[in-house]
Amino acid sequence: MQSAAMSDRPAAPPARHRWKVLAAGVAANASFSAIFSGIPVTSVVLRADYRLGNAELGLALGLLSLGVALGELPWGVLTDKLGDRKVLLAGLLGTVAALWLLIVKALPGQGGATYSWLCAGLMLAGLLGGSVNGASGRAVMGWFADGERGLAMSIRQTAVPLGGGIGALLLPSLAAHAGFGAVYAALMAGCLASVGLTLLWLREPPIAQASAQAASAAPAALRRAVVWRLALATGLLCAPQVALISFGGIFLNEAGHAGLLLISAALTAVQVGAAVCRIASGRWTDRRGNRRSYLRGCALLSAALFALLAALAIGGVQEAGVLAAALVAAGVAVSAWHGVAYTELAVMAGPAQVGTALGLGNSCVFGVFFLTAQAAPALLQWRGWGAVWLAMALVALAVRPLFPAPAPARPAG
């Protein structure tokens, strides 16, 4: 049963202000996504400039994900206690400080401790930057009525591929021609711009007082099994996604002998398709009130498409166009549901504990990111690409029953 406080549309300031709040949330998420997704794209230059082996490179990049996983839940709890604005500002400014630490202590050629400082700086950036997810999500849930939340959260989630795409386009060239000092400075600039928008536009929503008054009566989100189920399902369904985004290009090159143009086009199509489908699915589920059945359907479709990828790999198909089409279809299907899942997770937690629930969900997501990045290469070495994609199909299939069963469908709002 959804709380009445969660269903009231904000009355003051003017309702249109909610779109400015959403814009600030998108900017904050995009600036952090440029760090999280953009720095790994510089891996070739990073490995050469820092003179790292593959294992050292993997550890440094993995610590960025691990920092996010460790920080998400504490940041979410703090968001519910202190409010969106304070936590978002603290996290963004802390991320700026972590990037400054990388400039001061961890540029290539700064001595024997450079690698240690690189690892520390990246983990600190993840630990602090992870605050943007729960804080911005709570702001969106507070400012938007139930009939708009799926759309608003899905728009917010498009910041992830948006920021990642900007990072992928800008950072490798910047690293190669201007060095990593310029990379870290550009990322700092993005975070500081988000600080400015947060200061200008982000305020506690009109329902914040009512939510605070309901906090003592609301059941603790972390004591509800259904919240844990949905958070775990959200994290696990990211395993096929991160495996495809991280290793899909290598798969197309090795299995289909695809060139860089086709690989870039396919992975760009995945990101663009994911962004479009996230917004469309958020609006569609708002109108039909069917978030849970949609999530179950996405898990089943993802399992089927990753099983198709496995079959193509095991069957030795080498036609690059066929492999790319299957990869794009699987990538879009497994990336289209995020905004809907976060909306349902926040609604189930209740207005007083949105930040905690979203923090739990994101801890699961980034923990799975870290584990998948370690597991996929081992599966590849063990039994080849067929084993990688089949394992991801089985994960997606196992996720379906974890999503709560649909309630009787009725239009939201």
Image: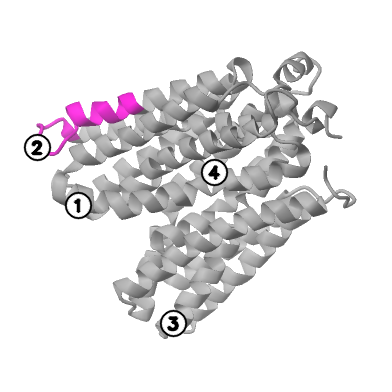
Q: Which residue is mark 1?
A: 45
| Quarter holding residue 353 | top right
Q: How many angstroms separate mark 3 from mark 4 (CA)?
A: 31 Å
Q: Label 4 amino acid? A: Val
Say whether marks 3 and 4 touch (CB < 8 Å): no
Q: Secondary structure at mark 3?
A: helix
Q: Which residue is mark 2?
A: 109
Residue at 80% across / 26% down in the picture? 5
Of marks 1 and 4, the one in the foreground: 1
Dot 3 or dot 2: first in sequence order is 2
Magenta residues? 96-114
In magenta stretch: residue 105: yes
Residue at 55% across / 67% down in the picture? 330
Q: Label 2 amino acid? A: Gly
- Is residue 146 left or right of 108 when viewed as pictured? right
**Residue 271: x percent and y percent?**
48, 59
Q: Look at the image and tell me in which quarter the N terminus lies.
A: top right
Q: Which residue is mark 4?
A: 365
Q: Is residue 164 above or below residue 325?
A: above
**Residue 36: x percent and y percent?**
39, 43
Q: Is residue 284 above or below residue 328?
A: above
Q: How many angstroms separate mark 3 from mark 2 (CA)?
A: 43 Å
| Quarter holding residue 393 | bottom right
Residue at 81% across / 17% down in the picture? 217
- Determine which of the numbered discs, if any, sits on residue 321 in the image: 3
Dot 3 or dot 4: first in sequence order is 3
Q: How many angstroms separate mark 3 from mark 1 (CA)?
A: 29 Å
**Residue 195: x percent and y percent?**
43, 27
Q: How many angstroms separate mark 1 from mark 4 (CA)?
A: 27 Å
Q: Is residue 232 above or below residue 264?
A: above
Task: Judge by depth and name the residue closer to the eye, 56 or 273.
Answer: 273
Q: Is residue 274 visible?
A: yes
